[in-house]
Image: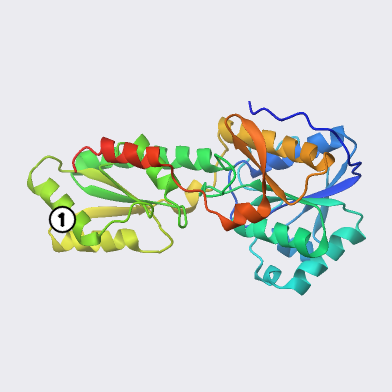
Amino acid sequence: MYQIPDLKQIETLRHIAVLTSGGDSPGMNAAIRAIVRTANHFNIEVTGIQRGYSGLLDNAFVGLNSENVCNLIQRGGTTLMSARCKEFHLRETRELAVNNLRQRGIEALIVIGGDGSLTGARLMEKEFGFPVIGLPGTIDNDIYGTEVCIGFDTALHTAVNAVDRIRDCANSSEHFHIVECMGRNSGALAVHTGIATSAELILIPEAPWQMDEVCHQLYQLRKSDRATSGIIVVAEGGSTGVSYEIQQQLALLGIDSLVTILGHIQRGGTPSPNDRLLASALGNASIHYLMAGYSNVMVGVERGRTITSDLADVISHRQSLNDSTLKLVAELKPWF
């Protein structure tokens, strides 16, 4: 388990709120459960906000207690639901959100989500002095200030399981299979999936590649009979259709290939034990940090312990793949 530092309580909180925002990720429910149960342990009332920042504007508030979160830890998605809220880019909209919280006697807000969600939280604190704590929830695993985000481990298990099944088909039909993973502008999910499944080729934004070169390598591989089938794992890389572009270029070289876009199956499903433990530790720690007077920070993990990072630093940086991961990919390439 993750170690939570001993913190001196300096704030007496009576009422907090929690919301999930942006894309959902497995383990968000486990985090909500931990927040509620820890808060209740310290006699702090918890209000849930449905549909993220949109619900905050619409006063979509619901009371949470230890009883109504008792069957959440194993459920995927988020019981509070999530949404993207374009209106939150406006200062007057954020002011309305803060007023809605204060009118209900809510003294602090915990936001679970990606960098866009954390940006909204930071602005609420910066512009109106409202206490906020962020938790990293995204399968992209691209949030600065933590080694791993809530949902990444489950998404990785889902992707690996899918590629293992596709590998069976590839070996039987002698096709190259192009498998596209989510990740927005990050290749974290794709590269870990590729390593874990012994993919013949891993294409990620962090290691620039050229379409012509990739297709030529695959053509030479097929022509030499060193491999009549294979798996190519591709990160979506912020653009759609890249996998189909590869397929079209291979077809021009006379190579048949099939495309599988894993899509939202990576977001859903029962959270893995690691995600449940991570989310529980972060949810619990967020209450302790609030009671110790922390605000405008995100709680993450590093080397087996919880840490905090200033939200300004979190949203101005992007978690990058470390050099050892890229080196491992280069040295494990089976053909090229």
The image shows residue 284 at horizontal and vertical percentages of: 74, 35
Is residue 162 among the parts visible in the rendering? no
205 sits left or right of 114 in the view: left
The residue that appears at 81% across and 53% down in the rendered structure is: 131
266 sits left or right of 292 in the view: left
Pick whichever, 312 or 276, lies toward us.
312
Pick whichever, 111 or 306, lies toward us.
306
Q: Quadrant of the C terminus?
A: top left
Q: Quadrant of the N terminus?
A: top right
The image shows residue 266 at horizontal and vertical percentages of: 49, 47
Q: What residue is pinned by disc 1?
A: 216
Identified by mark 1, the residue type is: His
Pick whichever, 25 or 140, lies toward us.
140
The residue that appears at 40% across and 57% down in the rendered structure is: 236
The image shows residue 158 at horizontal and vertical percentages of: 46, 40
Is residue 154 among the parts visible in the rendering? yes
